[in-house]
Every structure is written in C-alpha cells, then in structure tokens.
Image: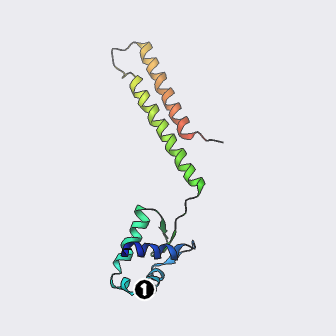
Amino acid sequence: MNMGHEITEIIYSVLADGEWHSLSELRCELQKRNSVFSNNENYLSVILSRLKNEENTIISDEKKRGWYRMSYITPGDDEKKQTKNYRMDVLNDWREFFSSKKKVPNYEMTEEEFKEGQWFYKLNKKIENLIISFEEK
C-alpha cells in the first residue's frame, strides 16, 4: 500500500464517527500509526485538499480553519440533484426547440407575423418559468 493510500485510510478511520476533528488530531493519529508520516507534513494537507475538493468525501468547517468531518450525502440530497439535472435537461431541450422555431423580427414582417412572434415569445417565457418552478409532490 502506498503512502497516500495509507494516509487516506487513516483519515477515513478518524473521521468515521461523523464528528469534527482538527488537523492536529489527524496529525497525531498519523504519527501514532506510522512515524514516517511526520517527515512530510505537507502531504497530509495535499490529501485533505484532494478529499475535500475533488472527491467530496470530507468537508471542512467554514468558521474554524483546519476542522474536518465526513461528508454524507443523504438519499434525499441525491434525488434533489438528479431532479435538478432533469429539469435543466428539459429546459435546455425546450430552449433549443424554441430557437429553431422562432422568427427573428424584422421590418418586412406583417403585423400578424409580428403578433404571432410576440405571442410565441411570451409563451416561451411562461414555459421556461413553469419548467424552473415546477415542484413534484
């Protein structure tokens, strides 16, 4: 097992309780388990940054620097993200359809064509608002 993987496993074991832990607690645990880790303290910070920013498996306290805990995604949160993604897909599909059908206003349009375009524009805005604000029950 390489050093990075071993440090990651130690971090996960400390944060497994779901409570906040300080950077100094993590360093102490690393030194207890393997004194080699004390030679390169920056490596811990690099791994914590990767776990926080890239993998999103841990979070840091916004008020207190150097405090971390596990990031748990509840099923409800995941469902909300998926619904938002579906909503954005539908909205993008609608906008693509609208763009393909709309007529660009110009001076050569008849009054009837202009009113039809105006109605279609208003309809588009209402449909976009409906897609954005629609709530499932």
Q: Residue furthest front?
A: 1
**Nearer to us in this view, 9 or 124:** 9
Residue 11: image location, x then y, percent: 47, 75
Q: Amino acid at mark 1?
A: Gln
Colour mapping used in the image:
rainbow
Q: Is residue 80 above or below residue 124?
A: below
Whether residue 62 sits left or right of residue 110 in the image: it is: right
Q: Give the percent coordinates (x, y) of residue 70.
A: 52, 68
Q: Locate residue 83 relative to residue 39 in the image: left or right.
A: right
Residue 4 point in image, percent of width and height: 37, 73
Horizontal and vertical percent position of residue 77: 57, 54
Residue 44, quarter of picture: bottom left
- Placement of 44 over or under 54, stated as above or below: below
Residue in the foreground of this view, choosing between 86 and 33? 33
Image quarter of the N terminus: bottom left
- Number of marks in the rendered image: 1
Q: Residue at x 51, y 40 (%)?
A: 87
27 lies above or below 12 = below
For mark 1, does the 10 Å Cα neighbourhood hold few (<14), some (14 to 19), or many (20 or more) residues?
some
Q: Residue at x 34, y 19 (%)?
A: 106
Q: Residue at x 55, y 63 (%)?
A: 72
In the rendered view of the protein, which quadrant contains the C terminus?
top right
Residue sitting nearer the eye, 8 or 20: 8
Q: Residue 47: which quarter of the image?
A: bottom left
Which SS class for mark 1?
A: helix
Q: Which residue is mark 1?
A: 31
Q: Is residue 92 above or below residue 34?
A: above
Q: Nearer the viewer, residue 69 or 35?
A: 35
